[in-house]
Amino acid sequence: MDSLCETLQQYPGAIVSPVILLPDRDTLWYAGGKIVPESGKYSHDYYLKSQAQLTADRPFRTEYMCGASIFCMAEVWQRLGGLREDLFMYCEDLELSMRAKALGIPLMIDPRAEVIHQVGASSQKQGSDGLSRLFYYYSARNRILVFLRPTEYGPRSEVRKIRFAMHTVQMALRPLWHESGVAKWTKSKDVVKGSLGGLILLRKVQSE
């Protein structure tokens, strides 16, 4: 906490995140991230790398702020207006990062601070394997709403339809590559359902 408070004193208008580790306390889950609006893709830097590979020892900037552990001054949060409640879960931090960028709010990673994250614990059923169905559905749905919904700060004009569609297919195939058992087919369908649900909601919003 001390280093995070120090970073906020140095950058009072910023949003700051510690480095996020998996429960083994060595594997990095998040240490900054990137957004690729052309394909509607976003990713964690140093994902599943050893902590030893992160050599930075001072706060540094990123373009995608993971929402698992963020710190900022109250006035910064009020200026942003908080998280978008209609997204419910997943991609709400992505959308917040885009708004922050549009407002000129720096997004910082403090490598001196660490938290442990049990990935997916809040959405996963006890005893189930892999990522939850909620993860696959809402990640797909909200990706559509964040990247394709017209906003004054959104990246819709930068989206390239073919690249966006190709990444959507990759997302639908991901459970088949990384999950096991019969559930992987259901989770693949959840990505398709989520993407269609996002398009339906997007069309509804645009018609209002």
Image (cartoon, rainbow, N blue to C red):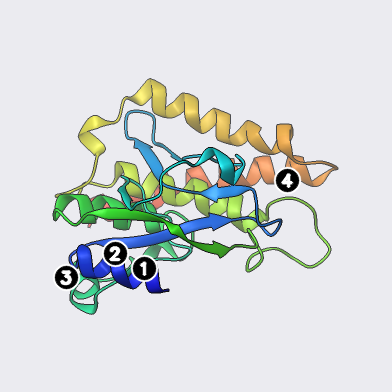
Q: Amino acid at mark 2?
A: Thr
Identify the disc placed on residue 161. none
Depth check: give the residue in front, 208 or 53.
53
Q: Is residue 152 above or below residue 10?
A: above
Q: Nearer the viewer, mark 1 or mark 4?
A: 1
Q: Nearer the viewer, mark 2 or mark 3?
A: 2
Residue at horizontal 18 percent and vertical 48 percent from the top = 153
Residue 17 visible in rendering: yes
**Spatial separation of the CA atoms under disc 1 and disc 4:** 41 Å
Identify the disc placed on residue 7. 2
Q: State the SS at label 4.
A: helix
Q: State the SS at label 1.
A: helix
- Near mark 1 (Cα within 10 A), the count class, few <14, some 14-19 or many ≥20, is many
Identify the disc placed on residue 4. 1
The first of marks 1 and 4 along the sequence is 1
Question: Considering the image in quadrants, where does the N terminus appear?
Answer: bottom left
The first of marks 3 and 1 along the sequence is 1
Depth check: give the residue in front, 11 or 103.
11
Q: Amino acid at mark 1?
A: Leu
Q: Nearer the viewer, mark 3 or mark 4?
A: 3
The first of marks 2 and 4 along the sequence is 2
Q: Nearer the viewer, mark 2 or mark 4?
A: 2
Residue 207 visible in rendering: no
- Tell me where residue 29 appears, x and y as whole percent: 57, 49
Kindly check if marks 1 and 2 are in contact, taking CB atoms under 8 A apart as contact. yes
The residue pinned by badge 4 equals 186
The residue pinned by badge 3 equals 79
Q: Amino acid at mark 3?
A: Arg
**Spatial separation of the CA atoms under disc 3 and disc 1:** 20 Å
Residue at horizontal 48 percent and vertical 29 percent from the top = 167
